[in-house]
Image (cartoon, grey):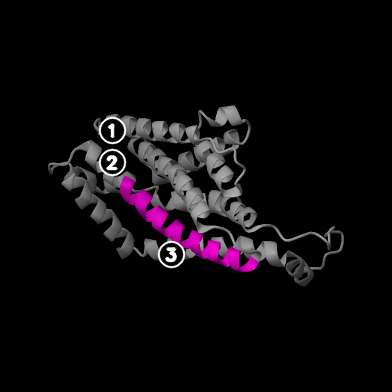
Amino acid sequence: MRNISILLKVEVLEAIRNIKLIWLTLFFTILGVTQPLIDKYMDVILENVGGVEGIMIDPNASDPKANEVLLATFSGQFNQIGLIVLIISFMGMIANEKNSGVQGFIFTRPVSSLQYISSKLLGNWLISMVCMAIGSFISYFYTVYLFGSYAIVDFLGYLICYSVWIFFIVSLAVLFSTMIKSSLFIGVATILLSMVLLLLGNLNDTLSLFLPSGVLTLAEDLLLQTGNANFLLLIAPIVYLITNMYIAKLFIQRV
């Protein structure tokens, strides 16, 4: 456990030294305020960028609810361009150390392969969630300001479920990092598989039970307060995460 904590501290310090914490937080903050602004001032934006000719806008349409805007922020911003940039930010976490010889030096110390990949998983998940959480809360308060109140406790429930999805994504990148030498290919493989899982998760509710992306369905139900939240959707991402780490441990031992 001591080795994991030391390696975890190194990951965090590296993120601070490379100003990764700063630029990633700023990025998610910008994403977080973009969707509420678009939803609130769409008609004004259209008028200023070329008019609304040919575009049907219902003048009697009511503003969306705060939770609907928050869902659009995550599904349309965080889970698309946000997820791609996030994966790019940590796609070289193992490959770069392997190619530079740092990994070999670490393994000359009393550090097991499981401790090493666990520190990578926990460190990059923690860094990712700190940056996303800051952007998320700024988005939450800005959305509430523009669209009305929404219980922060319910939003926290959504964010916790979303963090499980990010945990799985980081584990997927860890797995590919032990199998592929190129950071670019690791990033591409992680992004492509993530997008496929997102698409499959939207096809069928039963299928979602067996996919790690199914936890996003649970998160959505909690956010929209549909009353249909199925907490069994938490099982699949946790099982896949553990499986990813086990396979990664086997592959890294062969290096």
| Number of residues whose C-alpha sits closer than 10 Å to that of mark 3, classed few (under 14), some (14–19) or many (20 or more) | few
Residue in the picture at 49% in, 62% down: 137
Q: Which mark is residue 28?
A: none
Element marked by disc 2 = helix
Establish if 223 lies above or below 41: above
| Number of residues whose C-alpha sits closer than 10 Å to that of mark 2, classed few (under 14), some (14–19) or many (20 or more) | many
Which sits in the foreground, 104 or 113? 113
Asked whether 157 falls inside the magenta stretch, the response is: no
Residue highlighted by disc 2 = 117
Q: Position of residue 29 (x, y in %)?
A: 50, 64
How far apart are the alpha carbons under marks 2 and 1?
7 Å
Q: Is residue 94 visible?
A: no
Which sits in the foreground, 23 or 138? 138
Residue highlighted by disc 1 = 249
How far apart are the alpha carbons under marks 2 and 3?
25 Å
| Residue range highlighted in magenta | 122-146
| Number of residues whose C-alpha sits closer than 10 Å to that of mark 1, classed few (under 14), some (14–19) or many (20 or more) | many
Amino acid type, label 2: Ile
Using the rendered view, name the quadrant where residue 117 is placed: top left
Q: Position of residue 132 (x, y in %)?
A: 46, 57
How far apart are the alpha carbons under marks 1 and 3?
31 Å
Q: Position of residue 147 (x, y in %)?
A: 65, 64
Q: Quadrant of the C terminus?
A: top left
Q: Residue furthest right?
A: 54
Residue highlighted by disc 3 = 23
Count all numbered tags in the image, as a single digit: 3
Amino acid type, label 1: Lys
